[in-house]
Image (tube, rainbow, N blue to C red):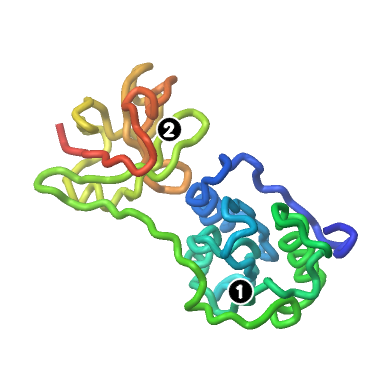
């Protein structure tokens, strides 16, 4: 990329996404980009490399941002965060791929050189064939729902501390089950507290809290909520006032 676009500033946001975890990659991209300078954003979590998924580049409606990566849902949440997709290109036959293209290393041979060309000033129409934005692969996501007096959420992802990200926001807790900060709560039958921060509960205690991106998460102070509650991706989490 520096050879193609020597004046571009390259910022490595993360190499910490677990292998094959497209959804965590998409969530991370969605949450990170609002803090990043507008420009060209390259993301690759690609368990179907060499398969039938397309390599794509897209332009979003807000902030003059371009996203480059596999068409497997990875770019979808970030695109929606910035007003949706207004232009897309299929990079399958791009003249700016590195030849010969490896069957298993499209990050190097397709995505990186094309992202660099875009950073150097080329337009989407220059690097690939026009693609209907409606044809870009969405990312299916679970949704929290009320079941009687309970709010049933789902596990979206985990961080390295074992904290558990849910498909839930503060407003859904307050409107759905009437929960307020500082109140006792049950999470899959385990007692906890809806707290502001870890220091609000004793070591080893369970808490619901708003994480840095204002989404609701589960934690255990100084331990792993993932292990303590024996949670796995997509598991249902039943929340009720205690």
> Residue 197 at x, y = what percent?
40, 31
The disc placed on residue 163 is 2
Determine whether 206 is above or below 67 in the image: above
Question: Residue at position x 27%, y 41% from top?
Answer: 236
Viewed as shown, does residue 219 lie left or right of 25? left
Above-or-below relation of 50 to 236: below
Give me the residue at 38% from left, 24% from top.
Answer: 227
The residue positioned 26% from the left and 30% from the top of the image is 193
* Nearest the eye: 184 or 141: 141
Q: Where in the figure is residue 170, as x and y percent of width and height?
A: 31, 48
Query: Left or right: 20 with respect to 238?
Result: right
Judge left or right: residue 81 versus residue 128: left
Q: Nearer the viewer, residue 213 or 15?
A: 15
Name above or below for residue 52 compared with residue 229.
below
Q: Please say whether residue 239 is visible from this viewpoint.
A: yes
- Which circle's residue, 1 or 2, is located before the other in the chain? 1
Mark 2 neighbour density, 10 Å: few (under 14) some (14–19) many (20 or more): many
**Element at badge 1?**
strand
């Amino acid at each position: 990329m520096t050879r193609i676009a020597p004046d571009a500033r390259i910022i490595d946001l993360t190499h910490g996404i677990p292998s094959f975890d497209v959804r965590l990659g998409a969530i991370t991209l969605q949450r990170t980009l609002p803090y990043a300078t507008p420009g060209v954003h390259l993301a690759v979590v690609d368990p179907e490399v060499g398969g039938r998924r397309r390599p794509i580049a897209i332009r979003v409606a807000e902030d003059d941002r371009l996203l480059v990566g596999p068409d497997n849902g990875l770019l979808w949440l970030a695109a929606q965060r910035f007003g949706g997709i207004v232009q897309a290109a299929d990079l399958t036959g791009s003249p700016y791929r590195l030849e010969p293209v490896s069957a298993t290393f499209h990050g190097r041979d397709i995505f990186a050189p094309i992202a660099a060309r875009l950073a150097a000033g080329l337009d989407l129409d220059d690097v690939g064939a026009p693609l209907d934005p409606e044809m870009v692969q969405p990312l299916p996501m679970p949704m929290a729902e009320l079941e009687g007096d309970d709010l049933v959420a789902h596990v979206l992802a985990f961080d390295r501390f074992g904290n558990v990200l849910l498909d839930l926001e503060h407003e859904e807790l307050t409107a759905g089950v009437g929960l307020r900060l500082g109140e006792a709560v049950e999470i899959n039958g385990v007692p906890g507290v809806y707290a502001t921060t870890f220091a609000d509960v004793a070591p080893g205690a369970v808490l619901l809290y708003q994480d840095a991106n204002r989404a609701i998460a589960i934690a255990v102070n100084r331990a792993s909520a993932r292990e303590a509650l024996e949670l796995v991706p997509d598991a249902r989490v039943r929340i009720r006032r205690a």
